[in-house]
Image: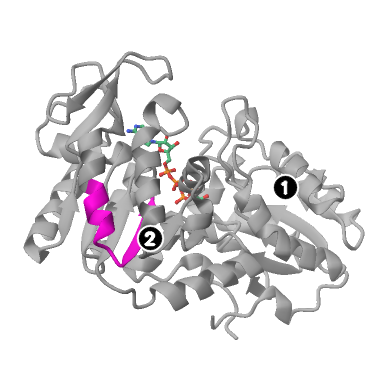
Amino acid sequence: MNKRTIEDLDLTGKRVFIRVDFNVPLNEDGTIRKDTRIRGALPTIQHAVEQGGKVILASHLGRPKNGPEEKFSLKPCAARLAELLGKPVAMAPDCVGPEVEAMVAAMNNGDVLLLENVRFHKGETKNDPELSKQFAKLADVHVNDAFGTAHRAHCSNVGVTEFVRPAVAGKLLAAEMDYFNKALGAPERPVCAILGGAKVSGKINVIEALLDKVDTVLIGGGMAFTFFKAMGYEIGASLVEDEMIDIAKAAQAKAAEKGVKLLLPVDAVAADAFKEDANTQIVSVQNIPAGWMGLDNGPKTTELYSEAVKSAKTIVWNGPMGVFEMPAFAKGTMDLAKVVAESDALSVIGGGDTDAAIQQAGYADQVSYISTGGGAFLELMEGKTLPGLASLDDK
Ligand SMILES: Nc1ncnc2c1ncn2[C@@H]1O[C@H](COP(=O)(O)OP(=O)(O)O)[C@@H](O)[C@H]1O
Ligand SMILES: O=C(OP(=O)(O)O)[C@H](O)COP(=O)(O)O
């Protein structure tokens, strides 16, 4: 990687502002479902502590839209980080402002402070320079270790670097980039991309560009229904983003033109409510009953997708095939995870929820690599430069 890293700096006595990605999957009761992203940031945090830095951590959690909300608080992450580090982690009531500045001013070398969710301020995702300046007041050094968020240009990872130098990569960001460049810079073909999950607008855009890089795309999860709506199917109450219908049509047209296989589910597990004990039936995707929603791939789809996976030499997977958190809708994801794990291909899994799904399936040790980034990894596959990397000091 051609960027400076945290190891290039002397951190003693410095306020080391580290942007981490603690956007971890949560259980319904607000407890942490998977702490992989917290564990991933430990080497950077431990290094900064051992070097005698004053360690200030910033992250988002989820997508809060209306200011502070307890369900998006980072407090559970502070508690888990303290357990993993074996030392106290102070929790700030906000991420900027006089009270936070006073907390930072009172820190000793080696102390760790976690700021509250940066997305509690609307300016964060707009990359508002005023908010970036407030972050800069807390920092002598900026470290970006949030690989999972490196495809965003927001205040806490990118905007703040306009006002703080040095700005360097953390160990996780560096390791993720090194892996990507080594393993996927020129992937062995055929390449099969599996895309699912619920972030339709964020990821459907990626498909068109991916069609230049991969041989097969398997679509599952909530994303599939925007395609089905574009094709004029009855999708009932399934997840859909109407603004993305034209993008779905364009992706299908380009796939046909380029001869890339873009496969969609043929059957689905439909439910009459978004809950574990809903009534369910397996239906053809052309016939989701009115008021029902597709929440998992059906068995015929799994069979079709398994064949595609078996013929690939490289597999990249982001986004579960269904609502795997509920056992009634987990089978499509779990069965496909088994096929990916048993394949001899290079298999790269990315994203917070997809990681949780692979762990739930019990195959985490049988895939080649699990990345903390989903969308970030896909954008690298597309050949894009990540803003969270571009903003850092060159070597
Ligand atoms: N058919 C579906 N309808 C609604 N939500 C879905 C569906 N399939 C999958 N999901 C949800 O998608 C979420 C994960 O999506 P996403 O955030 O895009 O993945 P990742 O975090 O791995 O990048 C999961 O919480 C899962 O329940
Ligand atoms: O979970 C994340 O991305 P991912 O779902 O692509 O893995 C990152 O924390 C970015 O979150 P965002 O998509 O709300 O900007």
Which image quarter is the N terminus in? bottom right
Say which of 145 and 86 sits in front: 86
In the depicted structure, whether residue 385 falls above or below residue 56 = below
Q: Position of residue 353 (x, y in %)?
A: 48, 43
Q: Looking at numbered disc 1 in the image, what kind of residue is underneath it?
A: Leu
Residue 5 occupies which quadrant of the picture?
Answer: bottom right
Q: Position of residue 264 (x, y in %)?
A: 19, 44
Can residue 363 be seen here? yes
Which image quarter is the C terminus in? bottom right
Residue 50 occupies which quadrant of the picture?
Answer: bottom right
Residue at the (37%, 14%) spot, across then down: 278
Q: Which residues are magenta?
A: 305-318
Q: Looking at numbered disc 2 in the image, what kind of residue is underneath it?
A: Leu
In terms of secondary structure, where does tag 1 sit? loop
Q: CA distance from mark 2 to mark 1?
A: 28 Å
Label 1 packing within 10 angstroms: few (<14), some (14-19), many (20+): many
Quadrant containing ligand 1 reads: top left
Q: Which residue is mark 1?
A: 115
Colour pattern of the rendering: one colour
In the depicted structure, whether residue 142 falls above or below residue 307 = below
Residue 279, labelled with which disc? none
238 vs 185, left or right, is left
